[in-house]
Image (cartoon, helix red, strand yellow):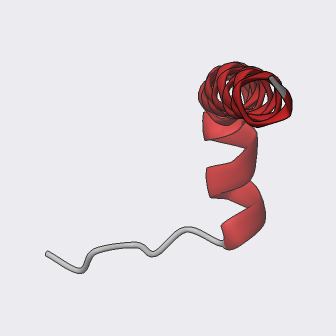
Amino acid sequence: MPRRTKSFNQLLKENRNTLLQDKRELERIFIKIDQKATGEVKSNRQVHSS
């Protein structure tokens, strides 16, 4: 039984919602990491300046 291969566009259409959810989740995670990193930099500067 031959297996039909799907084009990239077909796969993209089928998985678009999942990909968008994953993208939003990754953005949320990286925003949290950035906020935490900038918070640590600010607290380090305050320690050094005292």
User: Is 17 drawn above or below residue 16 in the view shown?
Assistant: above
Quarter the C terminus occupies: top right
Return the x and y of residue 42 as percentages of the image width and height: 82, 26
Q: Name which quarter of the figure residue 26 lies in.
A: top right
Residue pictured at 70% horizontal, 26% vertical: 47
Rendered-image quadrant of the N terminus: bottom left
Of residues 1 and 31, the one nearer the viewer is: 31
Q: Is residue 34 above or below residue 2?
A: above
Residue found 60% across the figure and 30% down from its top: 22
Please identify the residue farthest to the left as the structure is shown.
1
Residue under the point 60% across and 26% down: 18
Query: Outermost residue toward the front?
Result: 50
Residue positioned 68% across, 69% down in the render: 8
Q: Position of residue 43 (x, y in %)?
A: 72, 21
Q: How many marks?
A: 0
User: Is 47 located above or below residue 14 in the figure?
Assistant: above
Furthest residue toward bottom: 2
Side of 50 where 29 appears, left or right: left
Is 50 left or right of 28, judged from the image as shown? Answer: right
Q: Quadrant of residue 13?
A: top right
Q: Position of residue 46 (x, y in %)?
A: 81, 23
Q: Give the quadrant of residue 38.
A: top right
Question: Where is residue 14 drawn, in percent x and y?
Answer: 63, 37
Q: Which one is in front, 6 or 26?
A: 26
Looking at the image, residue 29 sits to the left or right of residue 20; the answer is left
